[in-house]
Amino acid sequence: MHTLKFRGMTRTLGASLVTALVMGPGSALAKDEITMAVPTFTTGAGGPAFGVPGKQGVELLIDAINAGTMPAPYNTKGMGGARVKALVYDESGGNTKQVAELRNKVQKENVDLVVGYVSSGSCSAIAPVAEELKILTLLTVCGTPRVFEELVKEPKYVFRTINHAVASNLSLARYVVEKYGDKNGYTGVNPNYAWGQDSWRDFDMSMKVLAPKMIQTTTPQFPKLFGGQFGSEISAMLRAPEQIVHSSVWGGDIESLIFQGQPRGLFDNKLFLFTVGDSAVYRLGKQFPMGSLVGARGPYGIYASTELNKSPLNVWFQREYRARYKEQPSQAAYQYAQGVLAAKYAYDRAQAGNGGKFPSTDQVITALRGATFTSLAGTVRMSLSKGHQAVTEDMWGVLFWDMKLNEPMVRDVVTYPPECVNPPADALDSTEWIKAGMKGTKC
Amino acid sequence: MSRLADRTVIGLSISAVVLMALAALIPNWMLFIFLQSFARGAVALGLLVLWRSGLISFGHALYFAAGAYGAVFMQRMIANDAFAMVAAGLIASGALAFLLGFLLRQYRGIFFALLNMAFSMVLWGLLAKTEALGSTDGLSIVAPRFFGMVFAGDQSKLAIYFFAIVLTWMFSVAVHLYMKSTLGAMSTAVRENEIRLEYLGYSAHRAVHVKYVISALLAGFGGVLMGMTVGIVDPDSMAYWTVSGEFVFITILSGTGNVAATYIGAFVFEIIRSLAFQYSPKLWQLIMGGALLLIIMFLPNGLWSVMARLRKARAS
C-alpha cells in the first residue's frame, strides 16, 4: 500500500511536469512578425459598449498597417518593418484572472507587446505585473490616475495613450461653468464602483474650485452597477431642486436609465451630463435624450465625425470603418486604434534610429517616451508621468439629431487644449492638484 | 510506523521537497499556476474539513477576502513582512469566523450554505462601495519582505513560492493530523447523527464551530497567498459569490478522500481554465461548466477516487 500511494503521488507530479514541458516556452518568433496581445471585453457587459468597437478599431488598423494602405505618415508596411499579428482576448473574469492571463501571454505565448484594457481595475492589477514581466504595454481606455500616481511611479514598460480620467471631468466642469453657470446647482447618478465614485469625485471637486457658489445640496445617487432598476434614483432626481445631473453610467446602465427616465420626463426637466455617453449614442440613436451633454474621454467618437475633424487620417478611418462594419466608430474604436498607432509610431521611429534594422524593446520604449505623434483624432503628447502618460485635447458639446446626416451629432462644441484640463508634469497627485486650485493650467 | 508519520504525511513531505526542486525546472508561468493552486487548494481544504461533517459553504470567499485584505492592511499600516501578513490574514479570517460561527453553527444543509453566501456578499458590497477600502479597483500588494530580507524581481516570486510550499505543507499536515484526532473524527458523527453525538457527551454545535473556524483560517491563508501571488486584492476576484463557487467546484473536483486531493484539484482547475481560455477565448466559461458536469457524472467522488480505483485494481 505504501509504495502504491507513493507511486500515485509521483504519477501526479510526473503528469504536471510533462504538462509543464509540453506547454513550455514556444519556439522563438521570427523577426518578420510581431505578436500584439489585445485584451478587451469579448464577453459580458463591457462587450457592446467597448469590446466590440475596440476590437474592430484594432483589426481595421492592423490590416491596413500590414498592407501599407494607411495615409501618411503611417503609410509604410508593418511596424518596424515586421508584420503584426493581433491576439484579441477576453478582459472579463476579474483582476486575478487578468494577471494570470498576462503572464500566460508573455511567458507562454511570447507576445511582443500588449495594447488594450478597458477597465481601470484591470489596469491597476496588471500595470505592476507588466513592469515585472518587462513587457511593453500600452493602456488604451482605462482612466484611473492611480496607475502612474500610486502603482507604478517609475514606469519603464507601461504607457497610457489616452488622457487619464481627471481630464474629462475637469473639462466637463469648465464647460458647465461656462455655458450653464446660471443654473442653480448639480447632483449626480453614478454607478457604485471605482469608476463611478472617481468620476463623481473629480467632477464635484472641479466644480467646487471653478464655481464655489454653484453647490449641490441633494445627496448624489450611487446605484448598483448593472442593477437594472433606476426607479428610486429617478424619483430622487425629479424631486431634487438641482437642474444639472452628472452621470458616468455606461453599458446596460445607460440604456436602463434612459428608458426608465424618459416616460417620467426626467430628461425634459434635467440637463444630463453623460461622461461616456458617446459609447451608447450610436447604438441608441434617436432614443438617446437629445440636448444632453455627451462625453468621449477626448476628441473621439462623435467628436471625430468628419463634420468636426477633416484631417486626412481621420477621414480615411471614418470611411474605412463605416464601409467595413456598417456602423459609426464610437470612442473605443478610436481609443484602441490610438494605442495601435502609438505602437506603430514607436516601432517605426526606433527602426529608423537603429539603421533600418528591427529595434529592440528598449529602443521602442525610448522612441515612445515623451514623444508627440499624430493620431486619428489629433495630436497625442506623451508628456506626463515621465513621458509615459498621454495628454490630448478634450471636447464637449450638446447632442442633437442631425437631419441632414441622419445620425446623432454635437453642437456648441468647445475644444479644450491639453494644458487646460490636465495637471502639469510636476503634479504628483491629480486629485490633490484639483483640490489645491489647479495651478499651472493654460486655457 | 509512528502515529504522526503516516503515509499521507510522508507523501505530503516528499511532494513539498519535489515541488521545491521543480522551481529550477519549470517556466515562470507554471510557477504562477502552482502558486494559485496552493492558494485555492488551501480554501478547498477548508471546505473539505466542513464537508466531512456534511456541511458545504457557498460563501468561503468571505474568509478568502478577509485574509487577503487583512494582509494588505498589515503591509500598508504595520509591517511589510510575509509572516506578519499571514498572521494578519489568519487573525482577520479567524476572528470573523469565530463571531459568525455562533450564528452559523445552528444551521445545516442549504441554510448553512446560503447564509455563508449572504455574509460573503455583505463583505463584497462593503468593499466595492467603500473608497477607503479600494472600491472595485482593489488595493495593491507589493513584494513582501521575509524577516527583513528583500528579494527583487524574479527572486521575489521564487521566495513567495518557497514560503507558500513550507506553510502549505505545515497547514496540510496539521489538518490531516486534526482529522485523525478525536475531535476530527467527530466530523462523521456530526454528519451521521448529531443526537447520538450529544448523548456521548460532546456538543455538536461546538464541534461545528471549531471546524468552521479551522476552515476559515485555511481560507484566510489562501487569500493571503493569492494576494501575494497576484499583487492585488479586489472584491470581484476575492469576495464575489462566483469565487465561492470556484472553491466548491475545486472541492467537488478533488473529492474528500485526502488532504492532498484539494491541491491536485486546484491545479487541474487552473490548467483547465488556462487552456480553455487560451484556445477558446469566447467559450471558456462553457468548457469550465462542461468539465464540472463530466466530473460529477463520471467521477462523483472526485479525482482522488481515481487513486482509490487504481489501488483496488492493483490489489485484486
Image: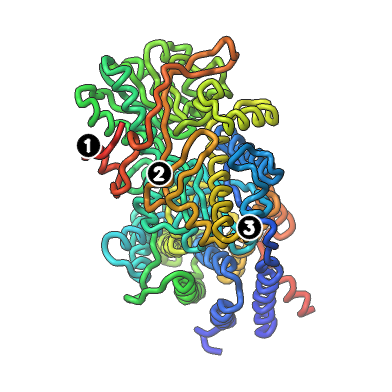
Horizontal arrangement in the rendering, residue A401 relative to residue A387 (left or right): right
Q: Which residue is mark 1?
A: A437
Mark 3 residue element: helix
Q: Is residue B189 visible?
A: no
Instruction: Look at the numbered discs 3 and 1 and tell me whether their residues touch, using CB distance below 8 Å.
Output: no
Tag 3: residue type?
Ser
Q: Nearer the viewer, mark 1 or mark 2?
A: 1
Instruction: Look at the numbered discs 1 and 2 and tell me whether their residues touch, using CB distance below 8 Å.
Output: no
The chain letter for the residue carrying disc 2 is A
Mark 1 residue element: loop
Q: Which residue is mark 3?
A: B274
Tag 2: residue type?
Thr
Q: Which residue is mark 2?
A: A144
Residues behind callouts 3 and 2 on a single chain: no
The quarter in which the N terminus of chain B is drawn is: bottom right
Q: Residue at 67% x, 61% y: name it.
A: A31
Horizontal arrangement in the rendering, residue A332 relative to residue B311 (left or right): left
